[in-house]
Image: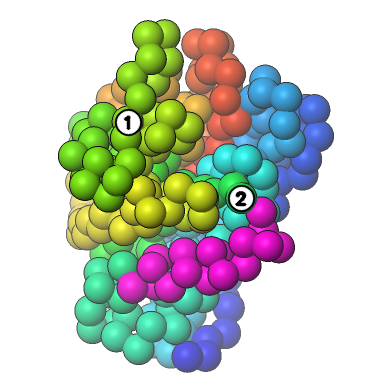
Amino acid sequence: MTGREIFHKMKVKVGCGSSASDTGKGKCKMSGKRITHGFHLIKGKANHPMEDYLVAEYKQIKENELGLYAIFDGHLGHDVPDYLQSHLFNNILHEHDFWTETENAIRRAYRITDTQILEKAVDLGRGGSTAVTAILINGQKLVVANVGDSRAVICNNGKAKQLSVDHEPSTEQETIESRGGFVSNIPGDVPRVDGLLAVARAFGDKSLKKHLSSEPDVAVVMIDDDSEFFIMASDGLWKVMTNQEAVDAIRHTKDAQSAAKHLTEEAIARKSKDDISCIVVRFS
């Protein structure tokens, strides 16, 4: 599949440093609608380099206009989320039935990408990454997929609706155990797959893959006059804010970049110590 990129394109690779942060914005006209986005990322207090990556870009493929948005939250290194940033959307858009069977194409591309990561484990290392992706098709249909606990939330007439699924070990314990794994429940800690990983689904993590899924949940929503904006963020935000609190905090902030920055700063004010990445996409 070929396509030429149009409008504004913004791909972000977060730098690594003790105070790594990045921010930006973009806009486009999509099927007569003015779509704007803003993003903000800030490194947490952990003693490792920044492991969050994001994508926000617009493409035209034949007669179709696409908005592509994603957040990749890595663990045990940044190579896997970096690979996802470069390859996942390409894999999705090259699926032959993307336009006719979009949900199935996305699921298949997630599996293919995970296989590619595992095959490159010698180069990419033993780490992994969660992912939440959103594809806005012609300004009318939003397709969200995720593995892990990064989250997408849409605001319709002031009401928050979660579009992704938090893949927590405690909710998928039966499946993990059926694969030969276990879920630890140590007092003072969160549940973990095999006592190690705090999410039940992720890309990579070769040493845990027998007990860990990379199968995404996929949701499709239509964008109408009630749709105001949607938020995508890593779990560093959602650990300290509810969906409705996040929506309420930025509903009257018209600039998407300012909205994304406000959410990350509010999460820090609420003592979040994790890396935080956030995208806000507004519909006019």
Residue 19, quarter of picture: top right
Q: How many marks?
A: 2
Q: Magenta segment range? A: 108-125
Residue 113 vs residue 217: left or right? right
Would you call the spot at circle 1 few (<14 residues within 10 Å), some (14-19), or many (20 or more)? many
Residue 124, quarter of picture: bottom right
> Percent from the top left, x then y, of residue 117?
55, 65
Please determine whether, in this image, residue 28 is positioned above or below residue 211.
below
What residue is rendered at 29% in x and 46% in y? 180
Give the camera-side residue of 122 and 225: 122
What residue is rendered at 71% in x and 63% in y? 123
> Percent from the top left, x then y, of residue 269?
55, 11
Q: Outermost residue, front direction?
A: 180
Query: Is residue 8 visible in the rendered structure shown here?
Result: no
Q: Any mark on residue 183, and which?
A: 1
What residue is rendered at 47% in x and 55% in y? 203
Would you call the spot at circle 2 few (<14 residues within 10 Å), some (14-19), or many (20 or more)? some
Spatial CA distance of label 2 from label 1 is: 20 Å
What residue is rendered at 80% in x and 28% in y? 18
| Residue occupied by mark 2 | 126
Amino acid, disc 1 = Val
Residue 263 vs residue 172: left or right? right
User: Of the residues under marks 2 and 1, which one precedes in the sequence?
Assistant: 2
